[in-house]
Image (cartoon, helix red, strand yellow):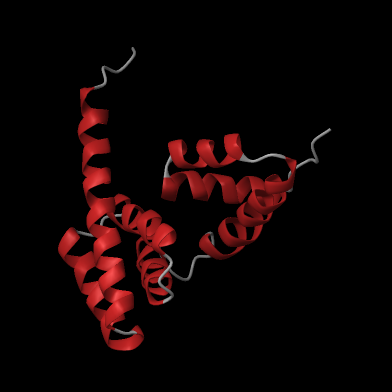
Amino acid sequence: MAAKRSALARKGEIVRRKVHGDAHVERRYREADDFLKMFEDVTDEFCWGTVWARPGLNHKTRAALSLAATAAQSQAGAVKLHVKTCLRTGWTKREIGEILLHVYVYAGVYASLSAFATAHEAIKEYEADQRAARKVPRRR
């Protein structure tokens, strides 16, 4: 029997879906067994329900900070996710490049280079997903 989710986790899921999109969140939940579900629940509760839901910064700013932090740590998978999040929240490709150049100065050339390569791939995937979504007929 699955544990009941807290109100904060439910609030976090709403924010998470808004920022990352339903497809990403659904995939994460679908792939989580009982063990990984612990991580997803805490992520929804703390990361999304507590931090991302705070009024001090908007989602666009938080997306850029997340990209810079993960790029500085050379976390390619997270960089890919956060590049797409930046695009979804309104950052342009040029602005994402500027964020990654800032990483160059404070975290080093190789962290930035890796992030640029990953961002390039993420941008292509995001654009392909957007084109595919426009081609899907909507149900009435």
Q: Quadrant of the N terminus?
A: top right
Residue 89, x across and y down, in percent = 32, 54
Q: Is residue 106 above or below residue 75?
A: below
Q: Residue furthest left?
A: 94
Question: Residue 71 appears in which quarter of the rendering?
Answer: bottom left
Please name whichever residue, 15 or 83, is drawn nearer the observer in this view of the structure. 83
Q: Residue furthest bottom?
A: 106
Q: Residue at x 51, y 41 (%)?
A: 25
Question: Residue 47 appears in which quarter of the rendering?
Answer: bottom right
Is 78 situated left or right of 87 in this image?
Answer: right
Please name whichever residue, 74 or 67, is drawn nearer the observer in this view of the structure. 74
Q: Quadrant of the C terminus?
A: top left
Q: Residue furthest right?
A: 1
Q: Residue furthest top?
A: 140
Q: Residue at x 24, y 51 (%)?
A: 123
Q: Residue at x 78, y 40 (%)?
A: 4
Residue 130, x across and y down, in percent = 24, 37
Is 77 situated left or right of 106 in this image?
Answer: right
Is 85 situated left or right of 24 in this image?
Answer: left
Q: Is residue 134 above or below residue 41?
A: above
Residue 36, x across and y down, in percent = 68, 47
Question: Residue 109 appears in which quarter of the rendering?
Answer: bottom left
Residue 38, x across and y down, in percent = 72, 50
Q: Is residue 134 above or below residue 112?
A: above
Q: Residue at x 46, y 41 (%)?
A: 24
Task: Count every numbered label the image shows and give the total.
Answer: 0
Is 30 situated left or right of 123 in this image?
Answer: right
